[in-house]
Image (cartoon, rainbow, N blue to C red):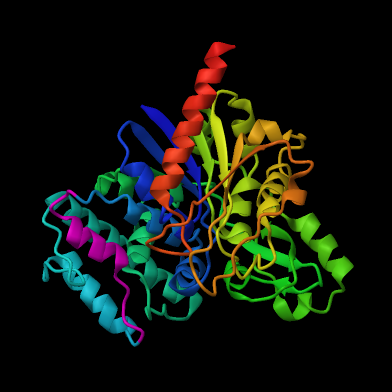
């Protein structure tokens, strides 16, 4: 059994994770940061003072066992969002009816396993009790518009497990008998912000993801509290930099993540949104050390196929340079690239008309001492997205070659 650890975000895992899970002999662990604060996840974070479960939920959905008779009901549950016009009283009454047993159906999903039903009732009861108390303290009401019901379940589980997001995640893993494991990078509840090179401030993870600009992001930061936008905008760019540098929190990677990285046979840096999904994970204290010190693991980084809003001008070399920069931020140790990466996988196809493809820049790799594999990694059936099966096969072939070479030395 090979231990495969993937550092990824939510959407960035949709091609890779299922392809890994379809292979025999692989134990797959996904490491995901939980700083998302958009939409209903932002509402959950604001009311419950917790990390955002959305990317964890998205990857766990990919790991639901599709041979389980309850798979359709479980999938529906993971994907269900309350309507945009959902009223708080209406939703609470609906949840309360399920919790008390007055209604066996939960949002059109009727799980047949008694353990699942009882757990859903227990943790949604915890959610409702916690929410009522929080609303009284805050003096405002929770908005259920477009809210994922799994976010509500996560909030209740979070409260029940003494406000530990990792324990909540692992319980949901066991409850739904997932085919792999998802771990949050850290259990510290921090706020993700970013500063662009022109001094423009991005005050939340949602802004980092959504705002379009050709101006590069200079640096991301993790803070204890949200910034007062009006007051912070009065500062000049040098003052902003000074404040952010002095208030950035270097959070520790969780002991569980350290352990899986130490035991990994293959470590994959997945494609995805860099500044919101990946770099916050990379700059966690102890993550790079755990990767570098595992000298027997094969380490592959995958470049994006198309440009994102937050990295519209990135070329292929920027992905490994950006990863290397953030991996070196937290530990006070200058890692060599060879300690962190064995190969970079770069797509060379252009199947989708009108797609803004990431360019391969040969000149950008002049001082990058990492092997490059250029191939067609784009899916012909879903242009613009990676072919997960091709990626996994390529990585496993490279791993076998590297293992055979090491054995011969």
Horizontal side of 180 relative to 312 (left or right) equals left
Residue 161 in sight in this render: no
Residue 254 place in picture, x, y as percent: 53, 40
| Residue drawn 32% across the image and 73% down it | 81
Residue 278 sits inside the magenta stretch: no
Residue at image position (33%, 63%) is 150
The answer to whether any part of residue 217 appears in the image is yes
Q: Quadrant of the N terminus?
A: top left
The answer to whether 370 appears left or right of 54 in the picture is right
Q: Is residue 99 left or right of residue 212?
A: left
Q: Residue pushed farthest top?
A: 409
Residue lying at 62% horizontally and 69% vertically, measured from the top left: 204
Left or right, 51 with reference to 358? left
User: Is residue 2 positioned above or below 356 on the image?
Assistant: above
Q: Is residue 223 above or below residue 18?
A: below
How many numbered markers are drawn?
A: 0
Q: Quadrant of the C terminus?
A: top right
Q: Position of residue 243 (x, y in %)?
A: 81, 62
In terms of image quadrants, where is residue 361?
bottom right
Q: Which residues are drawn in magenta?
A: 67-84
């Amino acid at each position: 059994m090979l231990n495969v650890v993937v550092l990824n975000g939510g959407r960035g895992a949709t091609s890779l994770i299922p392809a890994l899970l379809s292979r025999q002999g692989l134990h797959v662990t996904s490491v995901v940061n939980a700083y998302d604060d958009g939409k209903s996840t932002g509402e959950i974070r604001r009311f419950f003072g917790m990390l955002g479960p959305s990317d964890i939920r998205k990857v766990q959905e990919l790991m639901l066992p599709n041979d389980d008779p309850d798979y359709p009901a479980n999938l529906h549950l993971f994907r269900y969002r309350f309507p945009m016009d959902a009223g708080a009283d209406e939703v609470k009454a609906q949840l309360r009816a399920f919790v008390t047993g007055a209604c066996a159906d939960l949002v059109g999903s009727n799980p047949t396993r008694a353990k699942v039903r009882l757990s859903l009732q227990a943790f949604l009861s915890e959610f409702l009790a916690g929410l009522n108390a929080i609303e009284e303290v805050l003096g405002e009401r929770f908005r259920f518009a477009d809210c994922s019901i799994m976010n509500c379940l996560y909030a209740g589980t979070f409260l029940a497990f003494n406000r530990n997001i990792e324990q909540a995640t692992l319980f949901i893993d066991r409850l739904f008998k997932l085919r792999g494991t998802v771990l949050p990078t850290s259990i510290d509840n921090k706020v993700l912000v970013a500063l662009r090179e022109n001094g423009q401030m991005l005050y939340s993870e949602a802004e980092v993801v959504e705002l379009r600009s050709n101006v590069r992001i200079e640096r991301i930061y993790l803070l204890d509290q949200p910034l007062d936008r009006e007051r912070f905008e009065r500062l000049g760019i040098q003052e902003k930099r000074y404040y952010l540098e002095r208030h950035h929190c270097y959070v520790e990677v969780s002991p569980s993540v350290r352990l899986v990285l130490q035991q990994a046979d293959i470590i994959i840096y997945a494609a995805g949104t860099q500044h919101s999904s990946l770099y916050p994970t990379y700059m966690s204290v102890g993550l790079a050390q755990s990767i570098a010190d595992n000298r027997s693991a094969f380490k592959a980084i995958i470049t994006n196929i198309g440009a994102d809003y937050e990295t519209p001008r990135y070329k292929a070399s920027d992905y490994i340079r950006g990863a290397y920069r953030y991996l070196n931020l937290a530990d006070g140790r200058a890692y060599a690239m060879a300690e962190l990466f064995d190969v970079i996988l770069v797509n060379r196809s252009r199947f989708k008309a009108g797609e803004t493809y990431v360019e391969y820049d040969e000149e950008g790799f002049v001082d990058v001492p990492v092997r490059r594999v250029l191939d067609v990694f784009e899916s012909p059936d879903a242009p613009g997205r990676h072919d997960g099966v091709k990626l996994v096969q390529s990585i496993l072939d490279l791993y076998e070659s590297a293992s055979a070479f090491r054995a011969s030395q």
